[in-house]
Image (tube, rainbow, N blue to C red):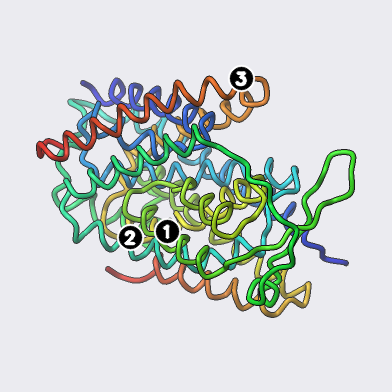
Amino acid sequence: MSTPEFSLWIFLSSILAGLLGSLTGLGGGVVIVPVLTVLFHVDIHYAIGASLVSVIATSSGAAAAYVREGYSNIRIGMFLEIATTIGAIFGAWLTTRVPTHAIGIVFGVVLLYSAWAAVRVQEHAHTTTPPDALAARLRMTGTLPVPGGDPQPYAARRVPAGFSLMFLAGGLSGLLGIGSGAVKVLAMDQAMRLPFKVSTTTSNFMIGVTAAASAGIYLSRGYISPGLAMPVMLGVLGGSLAGSKILVHAQVKTLRIVFATVIVALGLEMMINSIRGVL
Amino acid sequence: MQVTDQKLEAAIGRMLQIGVMLAAAVVFLGGILYLRQVTGPGPDYSHFGTGVAERFRSPAEIVSYAFHGRARDIIQLGLLILIATPIARVVFAAVGFLLEKDYLYFCISLIVLAVLLYSLLHVA
């Protein structure tokens, strides 16, 4: 395949990955890495390098829209970014120590979890009980805009549990070149008992900073190849921006189930390839 | 000027958008040149070996090669702008917290900034 032909195929696949990632809420990275490795036989190190830069692009590109909704919490995000960035550096360091097939297996597990998390989406009733002592000292409170009603106050709880999960989210992001939004939402929504909307929008804000922390290390290790990252970054960014426009009009529930099935298939394929040693 | 969290977040959102658009434009320009400059069989990404060439790896080298007119160097400059965008966001937030006189979160932002700069500037 010639370079323009190869670039075009990668570009088209990346648009699809971005679209898929944005419609399922999983992010483009989780989709593009298995596509590059399984379908195009790209070495996983180049794949996660290209994926990581596309993750920064989609997170930052979507931020303005999320801010307008008024759900994201800048303080909670910033504090937890201490955990995700340190975790990301640790994860990026691990990619040079862990054998390729192990990365592939971990990736497969994360894909299966992400698919499950995307289908499950359950909103628990968040409590309006006062924040615990640590959350209060860190001013992790806010108000949730309610259409046609008074803003509803919320407060974070169980900060250490959330912080630990964020370290894990950062580690996975650095190891696999993904945004790991699913784990970030888990940390805020389930562990810290923040409202679901606050968790998802704040998570999106954090993804770019987390990815930037491992991107520096990826760059110096030579994972970020301009010829490959160019079509991936432009495609994923375009696809996810289009996806966020469609999202407003689409029947999301059915889409989620269809796409989750695709993700499960990719995840299993990746695990099988890793075990057979052909990844 | 009264700095509120709402205004700060809106400003940060806009800044991120500008950074991404700029990065995407530079990558796109480099990409067009790349497709015109390359000849012969496509590159092989199936074996990692030691990774990409040295000049694509450090911020200082990327900037110094970017204006020589070679396509892949221009793409890499765009990617560097992209990586720098969230870092600029943290700087922005730090200044905002300082203006709000929220010294606790000013310090928290500086910690995050230190981690990011360590990653980007340390020599592996």
Q: Secondary structure at mark 2?
A: helix
Give the CA distance from mark 1 to mark 2: 7 Å
Give me the disc on residue A91. Answer: 2
Q: Residue B1 location, x and y as percent?
A: 88, 67
Give me the disc on residue A170. Answer: 1
Circle 3 chain? A
Q: Residues within 10 Å of mark 3 (few under 14, many from 20)?
A: few
Circle 2 chain? A
Give the CA distance from mark 3 to mark 2: 36 Å
| Closer to us: A269 or A191 | A191
A90 shown above or below B74: below
What amino acid type is highlighted by mark number 2? Gly
Q: Residue at x 35, y 22 (%)?
A: A8
Place residue B30 in its image quadrant: top left
Residues at circles 1 and 2 in contact by the CB criterion of under 8 Å = yes
What amino acid type is highlighted by mark number 1? Gly
Labels 1 and 2: the sequence-earlier one:
2
Q: Residues within 10 Å of mark 2 (few under 14, many from 20)?
A: many
Q: Residues within 10 Å of mark 1 (few under 14, many from 20)?
A: many
Give the CA distance from mark 3 to mark 1: 31 Å
Query: Comparing marks 3 and 2, which lies closer to the viewer?
Result: 3
| Left or right of residue A201, residue B119 in this image | left
Query: Can you identify the residue that label 3 sits on?
Result: A251
| Left or right of residue B91, residue A175 in this image | left
Q: Residue at x 37, y 64 (%)?
A: A89
| Closer to us: B76 or A134 | A134
Image quarter hosting the C terminus of chain B: bottom left
Query: Comparing marks 3 and 1, which lies closer to the viewer?
Result: 3
Callout 3 and callout 2 share a chain: yes
Place residue B58 in its image quadrant: bottom left
Residue A172 seen in the figure = yes
What amino acid type is highlighted by mark number 3? Gln
